[in-house]
Image (tube, rainbow, N blue to C red):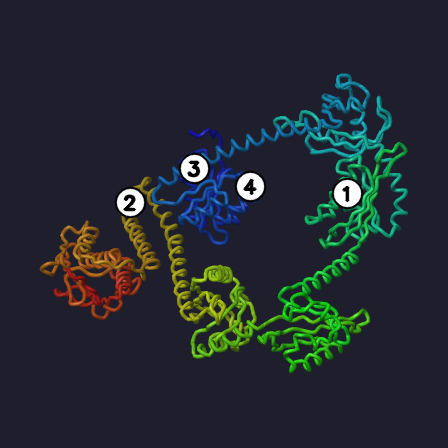
């Protein structure tokens, strides 16, 4: 039995008003402690929740506007612990998982009958009992934490006052401040409290005791017996025990010396405001050494005004990525009370970075005690940038000069060699001393390639005129071996723009040129391919594409060469393509096939099926080769089919919710009506409700399964017919089933057993509904199928094509969907079905195109 002994206020939210009222009625009947309010939407439910004290929410899932999960999330934003039960007709693992993730208290699926309301009432009382217990425990814990806070506060001058301002408990610090003992001070009236109570027309201390104020703080300047003149900074808070104010916790600090120093500092502020650097003054006597002054230049430098930084530490400029070494140096200097100057990255109020030259120095009083720290800030960003740029230039120059893959030389303005790197010298087997001072066109590189010497002199002359000269040359090594270089002459200028030297850099491209020639030969075989053949290097850069790229994607053949192939792929498809490419590169024997979208020249996306192979070790290709086929039309057809399936599934969900919900209301009200009265109309209503339920089942079957078949197996027709007849003929005692074949057990066809059973069951039910209780149904085989006929009234010739239409029915008990389902199952198997006249004038259905399975 639940421990709850008073009223429980429940909110029930359901977009069906009748069902909401029905559930409320049953819940209040089940448990007289439950008082239920109703709402028909999540927004209305939130309004009720704001206006009333609700202890449990019961909500439907599928509602217009916010659904049950969105409603739960909105409730959790305001009431994190309030019990929330999701009571839904749309039961699925997906909905249950989302509800649990959103913090639902309980999850219950709607069912048929009235027993579900007993279960729901129990779930509500259990949830509320747990909720009340947790809330009571939380309130008690809060009281304990406040008491613990009072104890912890006694590290400074701290005490507890009674309602008259007398000391109840004091700590040692406060007793020493009064130059007395704790025992002597306890019971005495505080001098601080009367000074506070005299301020203003209202007694602020009484307001604190009455619960009209949560805190009282400020500064007071007065004469204190036993101590003398002082300026105190105080804070008073109520001491709560079990929710009642039992006294006041007081914490105070003597700030007399600090006030005097601040006044002295203020006298110097005007002079410091004129300083050309940022200046801050901090107070080391207070926790975390807070800033107590910042000049105008500091605000110009950092964007922080004095009001922004007062009471805060200078760490606010450091951000997350400040270099740790200068920060550690400053902390060490402050700990040792000495000067320090560092340079570090800081961040302005708007988040922009700048380099700050910070100098910190202690300020001492006449006794040598550090009373303040003064800090100077200077923006050195421009200087740092110049230093970094110079360093980057030097590193780049050195990296280029030391690159083992590049031939680098420095020439004078007359074209003679000033310096040359080791890589270049290894090509001709000479030393630097042998090359320096030699005209570049007479060096050993060109000794065996006299035809190029004139070109070299021309390139040098152009570079000396300030041109950036790119070149390519076919040369011979001293041993006669040919090789190809490509490079550039770069003019080096002074600050006035005059050329003072030339930097030449080139690289051996013999192997690359050979590969290009081989690729051109290889590409000749690919010109007729209807698919796009692409060769990419190991990083994904396109090296070659076949002519089909123009027909498929609209690009000219060489237009994409040199580009990163991943830049052409749809962003959503890039991760899978990179993973596939990585697999290809890492495994020389691997192949992959993927489907993804590529950007065409007209910026439209085309679906391609890409088959890739690793040819990085191929003598001529040396790359990743892909064969890409346009599959856009196929993918679009598949997507259209999927969209149709999604629409049908959505339709099925609407049918399930929007029809089952009112039907549940009718069933519930009918059950209540039977309990209250006896009427001949109730059985008719019950029959109609049952028919509506079968209509819903038929519609859902058509929407979700009508066009699908599963595995095709060898199925014995007689076994399926007998099972279906046993299911549909329970109340038709005089009806008879016959088989026209001599050996019906030997008739086996290829079919989906479950779908075939649905087809036969609906045809038999149709015969019983229209032929009467004494109808005879005959099942027989055809050359390419089977038939089912009865001896009932038959189907008029004019209506035989209409009977398969959804909703068509001539019987009072029929749903109008039975023969539609039969037609769908036949179509899904690839069969044909035709309505005709039976042997004895009744209705006959021929199913043809069936495949028989030999015994």
Q: Can residue 359 be seen in this view?
A: yes
Above or below, 416 relative to 291: below
Q: Distance between the residues labelled 4 and 3?
A: 19 Å
Q: Nearer the viewer, residue 491 or 352?
A: 491
**First along the sequence among labels 2 and 3:** 3
**First along the sequence among labels 4 and 3:** 4
**First along the sequence among labels 1 and 4:** 4
**First along the sequence among labels 2 and 1:** 1
Q: How many labels does the image show?
A: 4
The numbered dot on residue 679 is 2
Q: Distance between the residues labelled 1 and 4?
A: 47 Å
Report the residue marked by disc 1. 330
Q: In which quarter of the image is residue 504?
A: bottom right
Element assignment for label 3:
helix
Q: Give left or right: position of 840 versus 194.
A: left
Q: Quadrant of residue 215?
A: top right
Q: Quick one: quadrant of the N terminus?
A: top left
Q: Give neighbour class at mark 3: few <14, some 14-19, many 20+ (Cα, 10 Å).
A: some
Q: Nearer the viewer, mark 3 or mark 1?
A: 1
Q: Do the residues labelled 3 and 1 touch (CB within 8 Å)?
A: no
Q: Distance between the residues labelled 2 and 4?
A: 48 Å
Q: Give neighbour class at mark 1: few <14, some 14-19, many 20+ (Cα, 10 Å).
A: some
Report the residue marked by disc 4. 79
Q: Which of marks 1 and 4 is in front?
A: 1
Q: How far apart are marks 2 and 1 (CA)?
A: 94 Å
**First along the sequence among labels 2 and 4:** 4
Q: Nearer the viewer, mark 2 or mark 4?
A: 4
Q: Do the residues labelled 2 and 4 touch (CB within 8 Å)?
A: no
**Residue farthest to the left?**
742
Q: Measured from the top left, where is residue 198 in percent x and y?
A: 81, 30
Report the residue marked by disc 3. 123
Q: Give neighbour class at mark 2: few <14, some 14-19, many 20+ (Cα, 10 Å).
A: few
């Amino acid at each position: 039995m639940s421990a709850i002994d008073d009223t429980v206020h429940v909110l029930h939210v359901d977009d069906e008003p009748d069902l909401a009222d029905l559930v409320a009625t049953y819940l209040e009947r089940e448990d007289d402690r439950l008082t239920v309010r109703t709402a028909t939407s999540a927004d209305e439910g939130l309004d009720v929740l704001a206006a009333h004290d609700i202890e449990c929410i019961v909500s439907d899932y599928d509602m217009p506007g916010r659904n049950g999960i969105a409603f739960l999330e909105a409730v959790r934003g305001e009431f994190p612990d309030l019990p929330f039960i999701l009571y839904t007709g749309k039961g699925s693992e997906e909905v249950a998982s989302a509800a649990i993730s959103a913090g639902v208290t309980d999850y219950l699926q709607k069912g048929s009958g009235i027993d579900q309301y007993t279960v729901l009432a129990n779930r509500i009382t259990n949830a509320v009992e747990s909720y009340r217990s947790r809330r009571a425990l939380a309130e008690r814990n809060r009281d304990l934490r406040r008491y613990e806070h009072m104890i912890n506060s006694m590290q400074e001058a701290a005490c507890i006052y009674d309602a008259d301002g007398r000391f109840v408990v004091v700590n040692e610090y406060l007793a020493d401040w009064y130059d007395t003992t704790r025992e002597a001070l306890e019971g005495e009236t505080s001098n601080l409290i009367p000074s506070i109570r005299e301020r203003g027309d209202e007694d602020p201390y009484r307001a604190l005791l009455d619960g009209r104020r949560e805190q009282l703080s400020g500064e007071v300047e007065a004469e204190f017996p036993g101590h003398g003149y002082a300026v105190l900074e105080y804070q008073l808070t109520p001491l709560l025990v079990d929710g009642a104010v039992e006294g006041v916790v007081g914490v105070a600090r003597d700030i007399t010396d600090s006030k005097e120093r601040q006044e002295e500092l203020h006298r110097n502020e005007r002079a410091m405001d004129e300083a050309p650097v940022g200046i801050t003054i901090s107070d080391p006597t207070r926790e975390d050494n807070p800033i107590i002054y910042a000049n105008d230049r500091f605000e110009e430098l950092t964007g922080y005004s004095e009001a922004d930084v007062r009471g805060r530490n200078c760490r606010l400029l450091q951000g997350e990525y400040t270099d740790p070494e200068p920060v550690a140096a400053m902390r060490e200097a402050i700990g040792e009370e000495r000067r320090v100057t560092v340079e570090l990255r800081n961040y302005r109020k708007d988040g922009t970075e700048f380099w700050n030259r910070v100098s910190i120095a202690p300020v001492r009083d006449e006794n040598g005690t550090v009373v303040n720290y003064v800090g100077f800030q200077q923006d050195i960003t421009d200087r740092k940038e110049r230093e970094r740029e110079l360093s980057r230039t030097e590193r780049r120059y050195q990296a280029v000069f030391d690159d083992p893959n590049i031939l680098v030389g420095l020439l004078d303005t007359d074209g003679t060699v000033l310096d040359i790197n080791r890589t270049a010298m290894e090509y001709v087997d000479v030393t630097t001393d042998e090359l320096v001072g030699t005209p570049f066109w007479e060096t050993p590189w060109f000794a065996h390639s006299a035809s190029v010497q004139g070109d070299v002199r021309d390139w040098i002359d152009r570079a000396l005129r300030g041109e950036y000269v790119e070149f390519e040359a076919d040369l011979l090594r001293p041993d006669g071996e040919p090789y190809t270089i490509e490079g550039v002459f770069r003019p080096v200028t002074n600050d006035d723009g005059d050329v003072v030297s030339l930097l030449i850099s080139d690289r051996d491209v013999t192997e690359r040129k050979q590969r290009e020639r081989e690729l051109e030969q290889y590409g000749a075989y690919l010109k007729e391919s209807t698919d796009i053949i692409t060769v990419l290097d190991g990083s994904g850069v396109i090296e070659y594409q076949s002519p089909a790229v123009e027909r498929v994607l609209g690009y000219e053949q060489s237009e994409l060469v040199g580009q990163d192939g991943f830049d052409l792929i749809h962003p959503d498809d890039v991760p899978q393509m990179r993973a596939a490419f990585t697999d290809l590169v890492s495994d020389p024997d691997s192949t992959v096939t993927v489907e993804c979208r590529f950007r065409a020249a007209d910026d439209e996306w085309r679906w391609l099926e890409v088959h890739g192979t690793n040819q990085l070790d191929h003598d001529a290709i040396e790359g990743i080769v892909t064969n890409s086929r346009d599959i856009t039309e196929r993918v679009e057809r598949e997507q259209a089919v999927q969209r149709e399936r999604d629409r049908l599934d959505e339709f099925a969900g609407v049918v399930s919710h929007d029809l089952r919900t009112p039907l549940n209301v009718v069933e519930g009200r009918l059950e209540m009506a039977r309990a209250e009265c006896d009427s001949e109309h109730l059985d008719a209503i019950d029959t109609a409700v049952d028919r509506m339920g079968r209509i819903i089942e038929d519609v859902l079957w058509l929407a979700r399964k009508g066009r699908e078949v599963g595995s095709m197996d060898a199925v014995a027709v007689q076994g399926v017919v007998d099972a279906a007849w046993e299911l549909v003929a329970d109340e038709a005692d005089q009806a008879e089933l016959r088989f026209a074949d001599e050996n019906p057990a030997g008739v086996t066809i290829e079919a989906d057993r479950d779908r075939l059973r649905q087809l036969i069951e609906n045809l038999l039910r149709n015969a019983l509904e229209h032929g009467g209780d004494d109808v005879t149904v005959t099942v027989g085989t055809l050359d390419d199928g089977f038939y089912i006929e009865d001896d009932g009234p038959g189907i008029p010739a004019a209506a035989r094509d209409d009977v398969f239409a959804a909703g068509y029915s001539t019987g009072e008990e029929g749903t109008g969907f039975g023969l539609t389902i039969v037609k769908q199952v036949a179509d899904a198997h690839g069969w044909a079905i035709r309505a005709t006249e039976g042997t004895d004038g009744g209705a006959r259905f021929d199913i043809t195109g069936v495949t028989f399975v030999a015994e």
